[in-house]
Image (cartoon, helix red, strand yellow):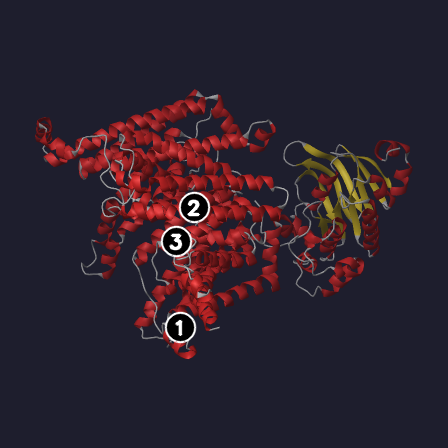
Amino acid sequence: MIDLLNALVLITNFIIVPAMTYGSQLALGALGVTMIYSVLRFSNFAHGEMMSFGAMATILMTWYLQGQGVSLGPLPTALIAIPVGIVATIGLVIMTDRLVFRYYRRIRAENVTYLIVSIGVMFFIGGLIRFIIGPNDQVFTDGQRFILKARAFKAMTGLNEGLAIKTTQGITIITAIIMVSFVFWFLNKTRTGKSMRAYSDNEDLALLSGINPERVVMITWIITAALAATAGALYGLDKSYKPFTYLSLLLPIFAAAIVGGVGNPVGAILGGFVIAFSELTLTFAYKKFLTYLLPDSMAPSGLMQLLSTDYKIALSFVILVIVLLIRPTGIIGGKTL
Amino acid sequence: MSYLIGKDMTGGYGGADILHGCTIGVEKGEIAVVVGPNGAGKSTAMKAIFGMLALRQGHVMIDGEDISHLKPEERVIKGMGFVPQTNNIFTSMTVEENLEMGAFIRDDDISETMQQVYDLFPILKEKRRQPAGELSGGQRQQVAVGRALMTQPKVLMLDEPTAGVSPIVMDELFDRIIEVARTGIAILMVEQNAKQALHIADKGYVLVQGENRYTDTGAALMANPEVRRAFLGG
Amino acid sequence: MTGQGSANRYRTALLFSAMAVLLALVGMIQSWNVAFTLLNLCLISAIMTLGVNIQWGYAGLVNFGMMGFTALGGLAGVLVAVPPVTEAVAAGGAGILIALIVAVITVIAAVFIRRRCAGSGRRQLWATTLVVVSGLVVFRLVLDPAVSIIEAIEPAKTGYLGGLGLPILLSWIVGALMAAGVAWVIGKISLGLRSDYLAIATLGISEIIIYVLKNEDWLARGVKNVNGLPRPVPYEVDLQAEPWLISVSEYLDISVIDASSLIVKICYAAFFVVVLAVLYRLAEAALDSPWGRMMRAIRDNEVSANAMGKNVTARHLEVFVIGSAIVGLAGAMLTTLDGQFTPASYQPLRFTFLIWVMVIVGGSGNNAGSILGGFLIWFFWIEAEPIGLWFISAITAGMADDSWLKAHLIENAAHTRLMTMGLVLMLVLRFAPRGLIPEKKR
């Protein structure tokens, strides 16, 4: 019995909690990407940099607040700063749409053109960020580090294995739940949200119904910017902020959106967690876990690892490629090819 | 003068003209049907009346008012409803959401109108929480018509509503259309199934190569031996 | 028509002359060594752009996997030219070979099973998964011990299998072939995807390739890098002893070291120019041929081309393979120039997206445009740092020396090149979407 509990705690500590956190970050990112895809109908390669921008704006605000002596007690000061980050990102994104993307909507450009344009946007915003905040690592967390410490857990339960939950992990998961719920409520219960879904479903019919396309586009960008800024800031809080990591986050996010079903908000969330859990479960060394569960004679000697930890991120690419080839509509089935 | 009329319409999609001085009109509570061979310009005439293509000559009037320069969205506000032939519902949204979207331009309380639509199409009430894409062909057409009715139009235009449905479903659809006309709405319908359509028509227009060839009541056209030979299979 | 043609040729000549002037300016203002380094990398970039343009300009394919093909070319350099580590090969070579055979068998079996069970979706999924997973397990069982043996042999100096010890120039061809082979596999499975999916898939696959190269030390030492690759040109040190070099350096009034390094760079440049010229001739010939016309017909209207019986998929695969092979060739050339193989240096920004900027700016569908684009964009990518620095220093000259803003601006001046590239790409796409040298009307 004790062994079973130990095994469960082990899995919770090393797989479930990190996967929930990482999955939340991916889900937020994928939700933004999928919304842009379903309304504006292109894959926004600049999304990673938009997340990075949101994180940067949050960091700058956090530094300012910290400089003013503002603090949120056990919680990171950044929480207050995130709304500012969101507003800044919204501004950036709307300006980009106005100056760059809107022209291509007007000339009814091909899908590929938007793709390449978004590369240009990616370069520009990326350079802008590095120019403002520099390319180095920035740490901006403060407040209590752990909600639950491993040692405290072990003392409470008397188990061998400890369970630690970082404050940032808890915040990420809770914030993600709040934001995702809001987005879903908005899309399903409000008139504007429904008009966005209608526009994504059948553009001609939506126009016929009197739905204003520019308004739909703007609201989509606003929501996406909020999601991107939050995801970026949370990721930076949890790990640390380094501008160039966000380009490498882009692929897992695309993977999450596609795996779940591009254009489908529920799919984006699902995809995020599928990717996160796959990455962690397939690269975990199950030696200790199996040692707890199996009788002593059958205890494994090797690490019992299916794939080495180095391949963690590569795994999301592999899953992405496999899904693209076998079932491009994704698990739930969003828009087809 | 008809309540809705497209008079002496001449135009096309940019290249050659498809319509050559064609006139189509309908009264309130009346069912007018436009039939003719393939390529005669039936759908084109309807799209012209709705404003989806620009006319070189001729104009469109509703209740005496010239609306030839208005965009389709603006004509909806003037009281026109349009049911396209294909892609005429939001497949990923529920039946009820489809109706809500139909009434998008309205900002008053739409629940009464929705109830009227449900009374007209009881099956829609039954399936109102189902995604419209999961319904059968005939039911989807009912959703499409219901969607167009949500703006409380004075004229309802249908582009080949029975295309691709079975004969039983077609009969049911026509029954519904008659009910709609009975509420005082003018119905203008383009149809491929000429015989069945003319059967319920108060007025019929036979278009050939973008021109009016025969114009008469539905019954008269069905009795006309030339029309029968050419379009109704004898 | 002739008027337009000659106007275009005049414009092309003008643009290339401008490019030459820019390089000469660098030589005079900074140094000739810098200018020739720049020239060599411009040449390589031009070749890469040529390869990408064949896929994009001829066929409208969006390939974001250039980074992977370049790395494969570099890998060829290692596998061909480095002397074999005999001990490692003897100890673990067989194991690796068996593991690779297992992998190939697994893949073939998986494809076979997939086809056999094509009727029942669920059975197909289970059967394929079973085959793949068991294949993976066996693969690991065979591979891991072999890998640990190999990597244990002198990890500081070698720790890998080594290569074939053949002349490095051969690796250029091998690199192209390896890239072609991998491109064939990738193309076979993913060319059916729509453009942005293809872009994402190729990006993902190239990341996987780099990942493997970074982590599989037994192959090419992973992040420990392979240094000291043999080269096809003389070593500077050897040159410095030559009397003719010493007299040249005296004549030009530069140090012997500088002169030797200059000569080496010029030698490389000569090689690269020959390769570029050959490729350009071939590419132009292809464009004018019936094959080229067919490619353009397919690109402009795939549906009718298909209806006319042209095998669009096969043509796309051809173009994908050829273009990627050229990128692989360039990758091998780059590694030869560097003299070392550094997997970590293959970043998507520099090797994939920057090349795309080159293609778009130069002129999609035009080979001369690609070369110009390669030169121009690479030039500004490198020169943006000194130019940006100079620019910002000029602007901030009025500011106090200890101003935080001034220090910050100067420190981050280098990052303006990202912004500039983005701006250039967006401006070109908006105002000159066909590029500097648009596709010729044929």
Three-letter amino acid code at disc 2?
Phe
Q: Earlier in the sequence, mark 1 or mark 3?
A: 1
* Relative image position of residue C42 (x, y in whole percent): 29, 35
Question: Disc 1, disc 2: CB below 8 Å?
Answer: no
Whether residue A225 is visible here, answered yes or no, is: no
Please name whichever residue, B14 or A249, is drawn nearer the observer in this view of the structure. A249
Q: Dot 3: within a 10 Å radius of its alpha carbon, few (fewer than 14), some, or many (20 or more) residues?
A: some
Marks 1/3: CA–CA distance: 26 Å
Q: Identify residue for label 2.
A: C139
Marks 3 and 2 share the same chain: no
Three-letter amino acid code at disc 1?
Asn
Please name whichever residue, A293 or B23, is drawn nearer the observer in this view of the structure. A293
Q: Identify residue for label 1.
A: A160
Total numbered badges shown on the rendered structure: 3
Label 1 SS: loop
Residue placed farthest to the front in the image?
A: A297
Q: Is residue A232 left or right of residue C151?
A: right
Place residue A69 in its image quadrant: bottom left
Marks 1/2: CA–CA distance: 35 Å
Label 3 SS: loop
Marks 3/2: CA–CA distance: 14 Å
Please tell me which residue is depicted at 22% across the width and 29% down the height of the picture: C267
Q: Which mark is residue A308?
A: 3
